[in-house]
Amino acid sequence: MAWFSLALGIAELAAPRQAARVAGSPLPAGLVRAMGAREIANGVGLLTQPRSARWMWARVAGDAIDLALLALAVGSPRATRSRVLASMAAVAAVTAADVNVARRLDRRESSVPGEVRRDGSIRVEQSVTINRSPEECYRTWRDFTRLPLFMQHLQSVDVIDQRRSHWVVKAPAGRRVEWDAEITRDEPNILISWRSLPDADVEHAGAVRFIGLRRGGTMVSVTMQYTPPLGAAGALIAKMFGEEPQQQVREDLRRFKRILETGEIPTTEGQPAGARSATFKLLAKGNPA
């Protein structure tokens, strides 16, 4: 669809009168050129964001405009009626294909982690297997003040009471964002879920599950959904600064795994920092090693 849009747009820009003649329509050259520019914009959008439904729906809107213009042209004495009707049939077929693809992309956007959804939110899903019990993993995570030790972009968490806490996160370009969060569900050794409170810099909700494995160890699974500041533009800016959310959470979970299994805090270079004994006492005090 992207290359079709580009080819059609270039043809309409380069030879607007010939394009109108092929369609059998007496549309003015300026209008045909505007339609060509629209097609090129759609083509570029589809090539740069191939999994985004927005550009496909833009194509559908353009198809509807083309059908309306062709329908108006049918009654013109300057039109070639047979060619206009053939053009309308061709555009209708393309429209049906565009709607089908746009709907499939809509469904994909609602399920693909890391992609910006139509509502501007981003869903993140990551898991890691840790050679520790669910009880130990849960107790370590449940003490929110310790989370910045393995969550690289998390600056601080201040616990307000049993359910509420204040989060400060480092953002691109030296900025930071803050929010108050509340625990919505707390099942010891099984699940912790949370959501941001009103007026947060980032609307945010998530859950972490601790799943005991038959062979031993625990699968720690994180699911989050948040709305980045500035919506899709904010998400794009974050990616430009290397702040891709899927990768962030994956690396945070790897650090969580390493801390629990070895008692070491990995640096950005992948080298351990701090002695096992001191760190492990801090993170797993009272837990069996």
Image (cartoon, grey):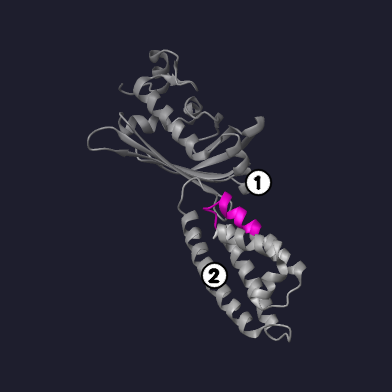
Q: Nearer the viewer, mark 1 or mark 2?
A: 2
Residue at 63% of width from left, 43% of height from top? 234
Label disc, if present, on residue 99 of the rendered structure: none
**Residue bearing the label numbered 1:** 230
Label disc, if present, on residue 94 of the rendered structure: 2
Residue at 66% of width from left, 81% of height from top? 71
Res 175 seen here: no
- Asked if the magenta segment contains residue 43, the reply would be yes
Compute the Cα span from label 1 to label 2: 33 Å
Q: Quadrant where the N terminus lies?
A: bottom right
Residue 122 rendering spot, x and y as whole percentages: 53, 47
The front one of 262 and 135 is 262
Q: Residue furthest left?
A: 215
Residue 52 rendering spot, x and y as whole percentages: 55, 54
Determine whether, in the image, residue 238 is placed left or right of residue 223: right
Residue 8 rendering spot, x and y as whole percentages: 62, 63
Mark 2 belongs to which amino acid?
Answer: Val
Residue at 45% of width from left, 14% of height from top? 274
Q: Is residue 99 above or below residue 125?
A: below
Q: Which residues are magenta?
A: 40-53
